[in-house]
Amino acid sequence: MSIRFRSLLLGLLFGAFTAPAWGMAPIQEPPVEEEPAPEEVVEEVTEVEPAEEAEPTEAEPSEDPKSPYLAIVGGDVYTVTRGVIMGGTVLCKDGRVLKVGQEVAVPAGARTVRADGMRVYPGLIAVDSRGIIPGRGTESVDSFDPFALYVDLALAGGLTTVQASGTIGKLTRGTLEGHLLGTTEWVNLSYSSNSPSGRRSTRANFELAREYLRKQRQFELDKKLGEEDLTEPETKGVPMAMVGLLKGESMARFNADSAGDLLAVCELLEEFPMQAVIFGGREAWTLAPRIGRTGASMVLTARDKDWADAELNRPSGWSIENARILWDSGVEFAILPGSTNISLGGLAGRDLLTLPMEVAFAIRGGLDQGAALRSVTLDAARILGVADRVGSIEVGKDADFIITDGDLFDYRTFVQWAVVNGRVAYDKQKASYFAHIRPRAEEASPLEVFLEDITDGMEDEDSGLVDEVVEEIDAPEADGGR
């Protein structure tokens, strides 16, 4: 053992153990003649002091909080589109993904999240939500509260993007920058098998819209041919919302659960092709191939139960295999729980706070786990029309991730970090309502590492010295007082 190490430890031990605050009898000092001369002690310490002080300085992190780079290092990266990268690194710059892989060099000063032993997923997306972001359309920019409790809770549940009332917003906690992602151009249509008059009215409007488009195209063609005295078709009385649907400028939204309603919607889409999303779909498994041929997307609740009708001579009711059958038939869908808000009622799995639990129910029904992940990431983004920005971990896309301590669809798993636009928006360790549940092990400070190295070195070289000191401290006094 070096003279410096022995002197340092003895000085710390003798100085601390003789202090009155310890409430112990002072330890007998060694004879004066055995102590090294003061000059020699100072000389020895002076010789090794510069070299010893350099070690903790080199070990200190050089992370720059203002760096444009963010690196997620060591986690298993679930890219959605390109499989799983085991022990990979996701390097981001200025809020976008710059590189993804196992051999990615991290620039000096980059902000770093160590995800060793954890999993990195794209941020989850809710196609429909309530109570998380307010406003309608672009109004959300003026009314979004980045410090709201429900924003923090949504991030804790893994959500980074939500849609509500025509607004597609990111949960940029603590800032308004980058909040608005887009708007949804949806046209709500009521088309139920129980309302013949409503179906007739809707079809009549589509007929008018289709006739207007036919005349408009002829007008444009005649204009190119140089025809004179042309009159542009009148728009009065024409349902321009339907025109936009037939032109592909907007998307139709239907609500349909029963097989009868779903069949009616399919017939409409077959006659008037358009982009469409169907919410509900409880009995969609009974005519999945036909839904797939229409090209319509769906938003499902995996455990929205309804018993079969015994009076019908066809399949009916709810099936746990609904999502799996639709996936096999080529139907693109997103999954939502029964309640599209954040509930504090304590019933886990029924609201957006625990969205993965609803998806796990579809997995229980046979849905492939990769397809299940797509239903709350990439396919949900495609339905909203923002798949070029979010939904998968790919170079060029927005740096929106969640880092979990286990399988996303395991009810015991927690989101440890949520990253939005390349910025850590949520850290479980700093969230008072979840931090106490299986807290992460804190990394040792440079000083703690330095002192541990000293102790380990002295135990290796002269374990007897430490043992003697410990025995001296633990040995009871003859009179029992200490």
Image (cartoon, rainbow, N blue to C red):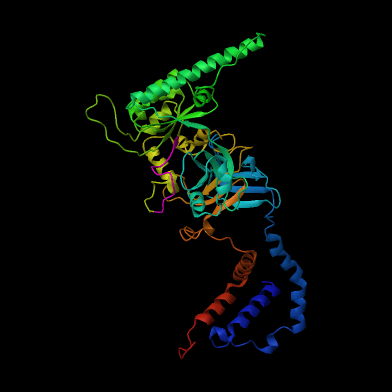
Residue that protrudes farthest toward the left in the picture: 311
Question: Does residue 132 appear anywhere in the picture?
Answer: yes
Q: Quadrant of residue 84?
A: top right
- The one of 132 and 28 positioned closer to us in this rendering: 132
Q: Name the residue: 67% across, 55% down.
A: 65
- The one of 260 and 241 positioned closer to us in this rendering: 241
Question: Does residue 77 appear anywhere in the picture?
Answer: no
- The one of 450 and 76 positioned closer to us in this rendering: 76
Left or right: where 193 falls relative to 457: left
Left or right: where 9 falls relative to 148: right
Percent coordinates x, y for residue 306 in the rendering:
30, 36
Percent coordinates x, y for residue 162 in the rendering:
51, 42
Q: Name the residue: 53% across, 81% down.
A: 473
Q: Quadrant of residue 147?
A: bottom right
| Quadrant of image for the N terminus | bottom right
Q: Which residues are magenta?
A: 334-344
Q: Is residue 358 above or below residue 450?
A: above
Percent coordinates x, y for residue 117 in the rendering:
53, 50
Assess whether residue 336 is covered by the magenta stretch: yes
- The one of 279 and 28 positioned closer to us in this rendering: 279
Q: Name the residue: 75% across, 67% down.
A: 51
Q: Is residue 277 above or below residue 105?
A: above
Assess whether residue 214 is covered by the magenta stretch: no
Percent coordinates x, y for residue 14 in the rendering:
62, 82
What secondary structure do most residues of the magenta stretch adopt?
A: loop
How many numbered callouts? 0
